[in-house]
Amino acid sequence: MQKLLFFSRVAFICNICFLLTWLMRYLPPMQQGHIASTVVILGIGLSVILNVIVNFFIIVFLLQRKPVWQFIPRWVAIANALFLIAQLILLLK
């Protein structure tokens, strides 16, 4: 469960990068550099994959009636699920 907690936190950080990447489309262009490219890679490439995996394991553990909420804060799991819905809508559109 500790690994799931770690990966759910990493997925949340990647989801914040996804939000920043999405906002970069509408804000004035930033200076292209290492930070902007890292945010784009984490936001588009890694966030969707990691978010699907983390949410899949949370659902599997909940269906097995394991105590997920003792290890993972509810707000992180809910935020990751909401980000996954937004990612699916934006990327499949």
Image (cartoon, rainbow, N blue to C red):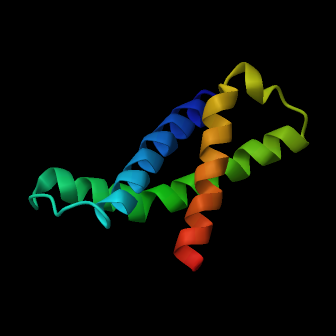
Residue 80 point in image, percent of width and height: 60, 45
Residue 82 point in image, percent of width and height: 64, 49
- Is 86 positioned to the left or the right of 26 in the image? right
Q: Residue furthest top?
A: 70
- Is 39 positioned to the left or the right of 31 in the image? right
Q: Residue at the spot x=36%, y=55% of the render? A: 42
Residue 54 seen by the camera = no
In the rendered image, the quadrant that contains the N terminus is: top right
Q: Quadrant of residue 4?
A: top right
Camera-side residue: 46 or 36? 36
Q: Residue at the spot x=84%, y=39% of the render? A: 62
Q: Quadrant of residue 23?
A: bottom left
Camera-side residue: 86 or 51? 86
Residue 29 point in image, percent of width and height: 16, 63
Would you place residue 86 above or below residue 67 in this image? Answer: below
Q: Residue at the spot x=52%, y=32% of the render? A: 6
Q: Residue at the spot x=73%, y=42% of the render? A: 58
Total numbered labels: 0
Would you place residue 20 above or below residue 2 in this image? Answer: below
Q: Residue furthest bottom?
A: 93
Would you place residue 71 above or below residue 90 in this image? Answer: above
In the rendered image, the quadrant that contains the C terminus is: bottom right
- Is 77 positioned to the left or the right of 44 in the image? right
- Is 91 positioned to the left or the right of 35 in the image? right
Residue 21 seen by the camera = yes
Q: Quadrant of residue 69?
A: top right
